[in-house]
Image (cartoon, rainbow, N blue to C red):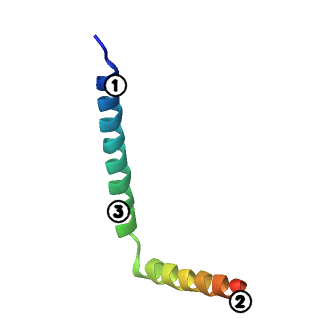
């Protein structure tokens, strides 16, 4: 009896479950940010984009 198809099925299933758990954790963690943290993130992101644009010119 060849078990390789079952091993792949288990591996893929476990991978999907882990990926879902990590994505859920990230979403829940991201929702807990305060308004000040969200604003700071946006400001710093725009600054970084401006720096990259200046570097390419």
Q: Residues within 10 Å of mark 1 (few under 14, many from 20)?
A: few
Q: Residue at x 34, y 29 (%)?
A: 8
Q: N-terminal of the two: label 1 or label 2?
A: 1
Position of 54 compared to 41: left or right?
right
Marks 3 and 1: in contact by CB < 8 Å? no
Q: Which mark is residue 57?
A: 2
Residue under the point 34% across and 25% down: 7
Element at label 1: helix
Q: Quadrant of residue 4?
A: top left
| Distance from Cα at disc 1 to Cα at disc 3 | 30 Å
Using the image as rendered, state which of residue 28 and residue 57 is in the foreground: 57
| Sequence-wise first label, 1 or 3 | 1
How far apart marks 3 and 2 lie (CA) works out to 36 Å
The x, y position of residue 2, in whole percent, is: 31, 14
- As helix, strand or loop, the secondary structure at mark 2 comes to loop
Residue 30, percent from left and from top: 39, 67
Q: Quadrant of the N terminus?
A: top left
Q: Which mark is in front, 1 or 3?
A: 1
The residue indicated by pointer 3 is 27
Q: CA distance from mark 1 to mark 2?
A: 52 Å
Residue at image mark 1 = 7
Q: Position of residue 27 (x, y in %)?
A: 35, 62
Up-down relation of residue 15 to residue 54 (above or below): above
């Amino acid at each position: 009896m060849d078990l390789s198809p079952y091993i792949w099925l288990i591996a893929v299933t476990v991978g999907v479950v882990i990926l879902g758990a990590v994505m859920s954790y990230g979403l829940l963690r991201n929702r807990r940010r305060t308004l000040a943290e969200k604003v700071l993130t946006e400001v710093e992101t725009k600054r970084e984009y401006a720096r990259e644009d200046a570097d390419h010119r």
